[in-house]
Image (cartoon, grey):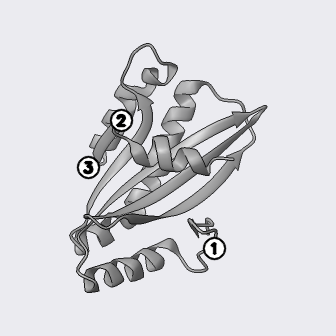
């Protein structure tokens, strides 16, 4: 089981699907309209790449909350591969939760930390990432509109 935690550092002791279902029921009962944004960012240190995936819940007009998972891999990888691995991690999280979001009528989008400006290295992965995300049936946002990956996940990578 992959280790998810809350923003305050509290470890989620049960499967993330159960945690999210409880959170969605609580938010629905409180009358909150929600949307969810899933994104991943990474940072390279020597031959290590650390990924941080976030599931960000935005309450309409009332702030939000998020869940975080960090993973480290011990290998060197080119920028394009790293960008696509970020997208893969976001899709994995989205795919495992999408039936819940459908059941609770929660809008979901995947945020990719990929720049739409061709002058940036990450742009080399833009077309493949968009095709992959749309091909899986998910909504897609890239920089500068991808706050889940470029702001939230970015702060969670050590």
Q: Quadrant of the N terminus?
A: bottom right
Circle 3 sits on which residue? 137
Contact (Cβ within 8 Å) of mark 1 with mark 3:
no
* Quarter of image, res 124: top left
Residue 24 showing in the rendered view: yes
Q: Which mark is residue 11?
A: 1
Position of residue 142 measured from the top left corner of the image (x, y, whole percent) = 36, 35
Q: CA distance from mark 1 to mark 3?
A: 30 Å
> In the rendered structure, which disc, 1 or 3, sits on the residue that comes first in sequence?
1
Position of residue 148 measured from the top left corner of the image (x, y, whole percent) = 43, 49
Q: Is residue 96 above or below residue 116?
A: below
Q: Which mark is residue 83?
A: none
Query: Residue at the spot x=34%, y=42% of the render?
Result: 133
> In the rendered structure, which disc, 2 or 3, sits on the residue that comes first in sequence?
3
The secondary structure type at the circle numbered 2 is strand
Query: Residue at the spot x=45%, y=80% of the render?
Result: 18
Q: CA distance from mark 2 to mark 3?
A: 16 Å
Q: Is residue 6 above or below residue 92?
A: below
Position of residue 43 measured from the top left corner of the image (x, y, whole percent) = 64, 37
> In the rendered structure, which disc, 1 or 2, sits on the residue that comes first in sequence?
1
Circle 2 sits on which residue? 142
The secondary structure type at the circle numbered 3 is loop
* Quarter of image, res 42: top right
Q: Nearer the viewer, mark 1 or mark 3?
A: 1
Q: Is residue 97 above or below residue 119?
A: below
The secondary structure type at the circle numbered 1 is loop
Instruction: Give the crowd class for mark 3: few <14, some 14-19, many >=20 residues within 10 Å.
Output: few
Query: Residue at the spot x=23%, y=70% of the render?
Result: 33
Residue 88 showing in the rendered view: no
């Amino acid at each position: 089981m992959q280790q998810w935690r809350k923003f305050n550092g509290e470890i989620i002791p049960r499967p993330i699907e159960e945690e999210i279902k409880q959170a969605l029921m609580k938010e629905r009962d409180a009358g909150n309209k929600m949307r969810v944004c899933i994104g991943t960012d990474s940072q390279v240190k020597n031959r290590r790449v650390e990924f941080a995936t976030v599931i960000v819940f935005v309450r309409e007009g009332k702030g939000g909350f998020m869940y975080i998972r960090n993973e480290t891999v011990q290998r060197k990888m080119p920028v394009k591969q790293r960008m696509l691995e970020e997208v893969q991690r976001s899709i994995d999280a989205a795919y495992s939760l999408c039936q819940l979001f459908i059941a609770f009528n929660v809008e979901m989008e995947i945020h990719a930390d990929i720049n739409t400006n061709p002058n940036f290295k990450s742009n080399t992965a833009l077309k493949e990432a968009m095709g992959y995300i749309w091909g899986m049936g998910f909504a897609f946002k890239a920089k500068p509109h991808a706050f889940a990956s470029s702001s939230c996940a970015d702060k969670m990578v050590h």
